[in-house]
Image (cartoon, rainbow, N blue to C red):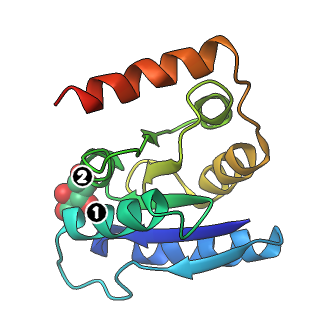
Amino acid sequence: MKIIIGNDHAATDLKWEILEYVKELGHEVENYGTDTKDSCNYPDYGEKVARAVAEGKADCGILICGTGVGISIAANKVKGIRAAVCSDTATARLVKQHNNANILAFGARIVGGELAKDMVKAYLEAEFMGGRHAERIQMIADIENRQ
Ligand code: RB5
């Protein structure tokens, strides 16, 4: 799979760890995040990754900020994006199986490296289950289309 990763200054170290791990899992990964710890604005990175995923430039995205919340809120403003903030492995699996989340988000100040890697693996290996879940995702798209 092709994956785009993005992060703000709070998540630079974890970004590198996750980027290497995603490569180890055999995926191609492109880095759209900041590479320094200088203060920056997470909406810029959330939007950048979300637009690329929405345009089909990657199969999915990974976004990391301090909590995972701000960057995912920003990403979710882009049409077609379902960015899910996770802090446990079961949820990371379920957001793909049930919600077909196209971006996994988490917080570098919330989860440690090992848990983050477990979540990334669970998310990337899971498959969308379709059926009733597809109908619900369509309902979400309908909300977006009514804006
Ligand atoms: C940056 O200090 C922090 O606010 C950001 O990384 C994130 O946690 C926002 O949701």
Q: Residue at x 28, y 23 (%)?
A: 143
Mark 1 residue's CB less than 8 Å from ligand 1: no
Label 1 sits on a secondary structure element that is helix
Q: Which residue is mark 1?
A: 47
Residue 31: x and y in percent read 50, 81
Please, is residue 74 above or below residue 34 in the view? above
Q: Residue at x 76, y 71 (%)?
A: 27
Label 2 or label 1, whichever comes before in sequence order: 1
Instruction: Give ligand 1's quarter of the image.
Output: bottom left
Residue 75: x and y in percent read 32, 52
Quarter location, residue 109: bottom left
Q: Residue at x 27, y 31 (%)?
A: 145
Seen from the viewer's position, the closer of residues 140 and 44 is 140
Distance from the alpha carbon under mark 2 to that under mark 1: 6 Å
Furthest residue in direction top, as rendered: 132
> In the image, 146: left or right of 132?
left
Label 2 sits on a secondary structure element that is helix
Residue 116: x and y in percent read 60, 53
Seen from the viewer's position, the closer of residues 69 and 99 is 99
Please, is residue 94 above or below residue 49 in the view? above
**Which amino acid does the dot numbered 2 rest on?**
Ala
Q: Are marks 2 and 1 in contact (CB under 8 Å)?
A: yes
Please, is residue 131 above or below residue 66 in the view? above
Q: Which residue is mark 2?
A: 74
- Say which quadrant the C terminus sits in: top left
> In the image, 26: left or right of 63?
right
Density class for disc 1 (Cα within 10 Å; few <14, some 14-19, many ≥20) is many
**Which amino acid does the dot numbered 1 rest on?**
Glu
Answer whether residue 97 is visible to the viewer in this image. Answer: yes
Answer whether residue 14 is visible to the viewer in this image. Answer: no
Residue 142: x and y in percent read 34, 23
Seen from the viewer's position, the closer of residues 28 and 92 is 28
